[in-house]
Amino acid sequence: MSGRFALSPEEQATLAQAQSVLADQEGLLVSHLRGTLGAAPVARASEAGAEAAAFLRFLAELDPHAIADHGAQRASQEWGLPDGQAIRTALNRAAWQIMAERPDEYPALQGVLQAIDIYMAAFWAGLWHASLQIALARRESASRPASELASPVIQVWEGVLVLPLVGAIDSDRARHMTEDLLNGIKIHEAEQVIIDITGVPVVDTGVAHHLLQTIKAARLLGAHCLLVGIKSEVAQAIVHLGIDLSGVATQANLQAGIETVLAQMGLGVASLVQEQEPPSTLDLESHNPAGVMS
């Protein structure tokens, strides 16, 4: 996985402190995970113990890359993004319950919230990327050549579409691509679209024009487009040809695009530690855990 998950020394210190606080809380984590995963769209209650152990192992080893791989493994077991959201909800509820019971350790427990945020960003990146690859592989299993693939518009999360493009893009394919994407935006009421051109071998003025027209059409329907997968040789060609993509948001690859969209949705890596006075027990009880990142 990408080095974007590298932890700073400050984060490592914060998470190490969180680990010491949670060392004896595996039972509580398992209980919350079992209850929440059992109510998930696909019941995963039997996996609560494994998920609690994975989170505690992350705190002990501080290895987000391993958690991203764990998310990818769950995707291969037919886990979906709603299951990941259920894990996040359960972990946050457990953290708030611990904070309510141990207000004297509030500063350290804030590190638990930060740990959950980093953990879930890594888990989601692995789950999301693997789920997309699995969906593409299933489409390709129909034995259609890559050059004949229609433009698959894949909903990977509520309001989020991915349009992975493979092969050459001519005027006829561009027209169908735009129609498929606009129909997908309407059907799914999408607000975010990731267009992945990793599989497009050549981006000339014609291809760039088609992409820009597609992005503009999507904007008219209220969807924000993110272009990913521009290879170095393609970037050089774009500059050489004087193609202006300054008005288009870009990221290096699909993983970076996923992280960007997660952050825009409030689901990405972001410190939840705020400088504030530790709340009283009454203040903590006034926070409904179900409303915290549920």
Image (tube, rainbow, N blue to C red):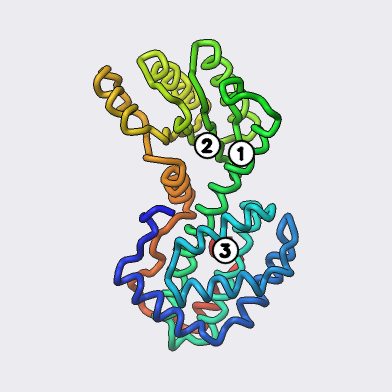
Chain-order first, disc 1 or disc 2: 1
Chain-order first, disc 1 or disc 3: 3
At 61% from the left and 64% from the top, the residue drawn is 87
Mark 3 surroundings: few (<14), some (14-19) or many (≥20) residues within 10 A = many
Write down the quadrant of residue 202 in the picture: top left
Three-letter amino acid code of the residue under disc 1: Gln
Front in this rendered view, residue 77 or 163: 77
Front in this rendered view, residue 93 or 24: 24
Local SS, label 1: strand
Decide: is 261 above or below 39.
above
Position in image of residue 100 (x %, y %): 53, 82
Q: CA distance from mark 1 to mark 3?
A: 20 Å
Q: Which residue is mark 2?
A: 191
Position in image of residue 148 (x %, y %): 60, 20
Q: Nearer the viewer, mark 1 or mark 2?
A: 1
Three-letter amino acid code of the residue under disc 2: Glu
Front in this rendered view, residue 90 or 51: 51
Position in image of residue 39 (x %, y %): 73, 62
Chain-order first, disc 2 or disc 3: 3
At 44% from the left and 49% from the top, the residue drawn is 259
Write down the quadrant of residue 228 in the picture: top left
Local SS, label 2: loop
Q: Which residue is mark 1?
A: 155
Mark number, residue 88? 3
Mark 1 surroundings: few (<14), some (14-19) or many (≥20) residues within 10 A = some
Residue 288 visible (yes or no): no
Look at the image and tell me in which quarter the C terminus lies.
bottom right
Front in this rendered view, residue 258 or 229: 229
Hey, which residue is sitting farthest top in the picture? 171
